[in-house]
Image (cartoon, rainbow, N blue to C red):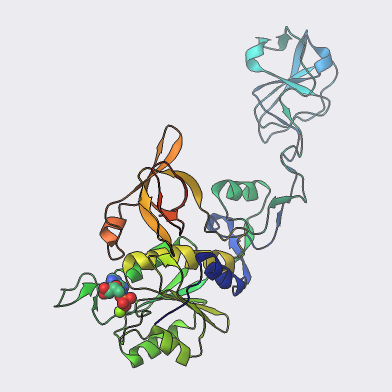
Amino acid sequence: MVVSLLTREEALAKVLERTEVLPAEEVPIAKAAGRFVASDAYAGVDLPPFASSAMDGFALRADDTPGRLPVVGRVAAGVPARRALGPGEAMAIATGGVVPEGADAVVPIEYVVDHDNEVEIRDAVVRGANVRPRGGDIRAGDVVVAAGTSLAPAHVGALAAVGLDQVACARRPRVAVLSTGTELRRPGEPLGSGEVYEANGAMLAAALATANADIVELAAVSDDDDAHRVSLERALGADVVVTSGGVSVGPHDLVRRIARELGVQEVFWGVAVRPGKPVSFGVRDGTLVFGLPGNPVSSLVGCELFVRPALRALQGAAEPGPVYEPGRLAAAARRNPHRDELLRAHMTVRDGEVVLVPITGQESHMIARAASANALVLAPRGDGELPAGARVGYLRLG
Ligand code: AMP
Ligand code: MG
């Protein structure tokens, strides 16, 4: 049977075309790390909210230096001075303290001679020295975090610093994960003749949890029409369905047929990648349906190439990815003339450069070998080989 394969790029474009951003919800900032901001978040205050001291020292007027000035007050963080600073005066001030009205510079404590009620400044001080101007970081009303940003710890810190206790984020996509195969046995149970442990469900759930998936894990189904029908129908209540196994051409590969019977419109089947060629993709109403091949490494690769970017796009990511980072191949690798190959590799940094060492054991059933990899190297389809030292793109795993 001849099947025309889409390229990896075409297939991804078809997935992203059919992905609509999920509605937003307010998320407390303490729970927002890793989530995608749905609309621009604005600063509620100037930051700093007042002119503040960058150092422990003395607030004064630059024009009064050098000189010997009486210390007329003490300013602690959170405790402003009761009055303005007059000409020829100094006030002791702590880091973060409000620079008093009338002062225009702070001299660090290390640079003065402290005579209890008087302070001696031997060098001239520049106006503005060690004063953090009000709004110098951001102004009230400015965008502090833009829509589509994935919230890193610094974003969370910035949101808090401008007074926001919650932020609008796309809601987490509900993702149903369904493994298929009569031979599958739950880990922890004894293995019967011809059986293998069910690995994909837990693996895919783990991978997609890092893309904010709210996982609906279903019990694995045997290769039986009715079992497929019941579980797939349940799964189709989610935003995204990810099945594994049963998408090849064998008589026991039922996923695509049953999905079609349940109203899923198939968008494609077959992508020019290795591993993962028989991956299928369809939609029913708003639900995205990915059929990943059963071999665990194929499932993982399909998940990284298509499902993760879809989840990110569903959350309005500015960059759904996948983002291939640059590195160098440590050893030569053969290329496949027709299919992009995703090699499992170990990524290290040598002399400041990312070096990717393909692991031994590149077959698609070898999940235990793949577990020693932390990168997927893209060996683009083409003739010949990629020589050792070739520049390549890679995806981080885990
Ligand atoms: P399939 O894509 O259904 O033809 O399965 C291909 C291979 O992957 C077969 O050797 C299956 O036993 C194996 N396989 C399928 N699903 C899983 C799974 N969930 N966990 C581990 N191996 C699987
Ligand atoms: Mg199967």
Image x and y of residue 266, in percent: 51, 83
Q: Quadrant of residue 361?
A: bottom left
Q: In this view, does 53 lie to the left or right of 151?
A: right
Image x and y of residue 220, in percent: 31, 79
Direction front: furthest residue = 384
The residue depicted at 43 percent of the width and 71 percent of the height is 215
Q: Is residue 37 left or right of residue 359?
A: right
46 to 201, vertically: above or below: above
The residue depicted at 59 percent of the width and 75 percent of the height is 18
Q: For the image shown, how many numbered marks are present on the structure?
A: 0
Residue in front for this viewpoint, 383 or 4: 383
Q: In which quarter of the image is residue 67?
A: top right
Which image quadrant shows ligand 1?
Answer: bottom left
The N terminus lies in quadrant: bottom left
Does the image show residue 172? no
Q: In which quarter of the image is residue 139?
A: top right
224 to 16, vertically: above or below: below
The residue depicted at 84 percent of the width and 25 percent of the height is 102
Residue in front for this viewpoint, 147 or 87: 147
385 to 239, vertically: above or below: above
Image x and y of residue 225, in percent: 34, 91
Direction left: furthest residue = 193
Image x and y of residue 270, in percent: 45, 74
Residue in front for this viewpoint, 351 or 371: 351
Does the image show residue 380? yes
The C terminus lies in quadrant: bottom left
